Image (cartoon, grey):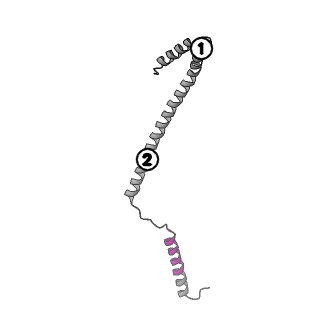
Amino acid sequence: MFKNKNNIVITFLSVALLVCLFLLLKSEPTIPYDENLINTRINTLEQENDQLQKDIQSERLKSANFMMKIDSLKKQAPIIEYKYIKIYEKIDSSSVIDVVNEFDSIFTTNRIH
C-alpha cells in the first residue's frame, strides 16, 4: 500500500492535522459578555419580580375584603327586605298622613333632607 517512508509520514501528518483541526473547530466559540451588565439585569428582574409578588398579595387582600363585604350585604338583604315589607304593609293599611309621617321618619333616620 505505502511504497516509501515519505508517503507514510505525509499520511500520518495529514491525519494528525485533520484531527487537530477537527478538535480546534469542534470547540464552542466563546462569546464576550459583560458580567456587570448581566448581574445588573438579574437584579432588576428580581426587584421587578418582588414588586409583582407584593402587588399580587395586595390584590388578593383587596379581593378577600371585597368578598367579605359582598357576603355581609347578602346576609343583610333578607333583614332589609323584611323591614321594608313590614313598612309597605303598614302603608297599605294606613291613611295618607300616616304614610307621609312614616317616610319622614325613614328620611330622618337615614339623614336625608
Q: In this view, does 29 lie to the left or right of 92?
A: left
Name the kind of residue labelled 2 in the image: Glu
Q: Do the residues labelled 1 and 2 touch (CB within 8 Å)?
A: no
- Dot 1: few (<14), some (14–19), or many (≥20) neighbours within 10 Å? some
Q: Which label sits in the foreground, 1 or 2?
A: 1
Placement of the N terminus among the 4 image quadrants:
bottom right
Residue under the image location 50 percent in, 16 percent down: 104
In the image, residue 85 sits, relative to residue 35, either above or below, namely above
Write the residue at 59% across / 88% down.
Answer: 3
Task: Name the kind of residue labelled 1 in the image.
Answer: Ile
33 left or right of 78 in image: left
**Image location (x, y in percent) of residue 5:** 54, 86
Question: Is residue 19 found inside the magenta-colored segment of the image?
Answer: yes
Magenta part of the chain: 13-28
Nearer-N-terminus badge (1/2): 2
State the residue position of label 2. Answer: 48
Task: Kindly identify which residue carries mark 1.
Answer: 91
Count of all numbered marks drawn on residues in the image: 2
In which quadrant of the rendered image does the C terminus lie?
A: top left
Label 2 SS: helix
Q: Distance between the residues labelled 1 and 2?
A: 61 Å
Front residue of this view, candidates 105 and 15:
105
Asked whether, in this view, residue 84 is left or right of residue 105, the answer is: right
Query: Residue 4 placed where, x, y %?
Result: 56, 88
